[in-house]
Image (cartoon, rainbow, N blue to C red):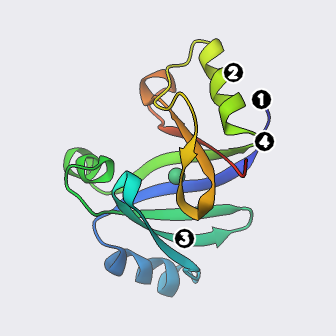
Amino acid sequence: MKVSHIEHIGIAVKSLDEAIPYYEDVLGMKCYAIEEVTDQKVKTAFFKVGDTKIELLESTDPAGPIGKFIEKKGQGIHHLAFAVDNVNEALTEAESKGVQLIDKTSRKGAEGLNIGFLHPKATMGVLTEFCSEQ
Ligand code: ZN
């Protein structure tokens, strides 16, 4: 497997309206996209930092993954996403090396990317996502 860079860092926030001004007014970044991903019950806001993005995640449903995460742990870093050539190949390779998967095959994430998650129990507590354009 070849990871080219950190595609994005996912950060769980209670409210995009509260979080975006911090990134824009304090850190001087520009939110270039807001997108709802109904599959994951989140609304996302994106910022670019070099080749990496910051993905803010606001829950749209308390029973969804971000809603549950915030209830348990509060706001904060939720996951790390690595850019790979092909998500399905990366998932298969990780599984063949004994890593527990959340997604056996890729699904569609924000920005039309293919994504797949590894289980944080198998990755020293870091919820890990693979992203690719194919
Ligand atoms: Zn992500």
Q: Amino acid at mark 3?
A: Phe
Helix, strand or loop under label 2? helix
How far is disc 1 from disc 2 in space, using C-alphas? 7 Å
Mark 3 = which residue?
46
Q: For ligand 1, tell me if the residue under mark 3 lies within 8 Å.
A: no
Ligand 1 within 8 angstroms of badge 2 C-beta: no
Disc 2 marks a residue whose amino acid type is Glu
In the structure shown, which secondary structural element does the residue marked by tag 3 occupy? Answer: strand
Q: Which residue is mark 2?
A: 93
- Disc 4 to disc 1, C-alpha distance: 8 Å
Return the disc, 3 or 4, that comes first in the chain's sequence. 3
User: Is the CB of the residue bearing disc 1 within 8 angstroms of ligand 1?
Assistant: no
* Picture residue at 63% right of the left edge, 54% below the top: 113
* Residue to which mark 4 is pinned: 85
Residue at left offset 28%, top offset 63%: 60
In the rendered structure, which disc, 2 or 4, sits on the residue that comes first in sequence?
4
Looking at the image, residue 114 sits to the left or right of residue 89; the answer is left
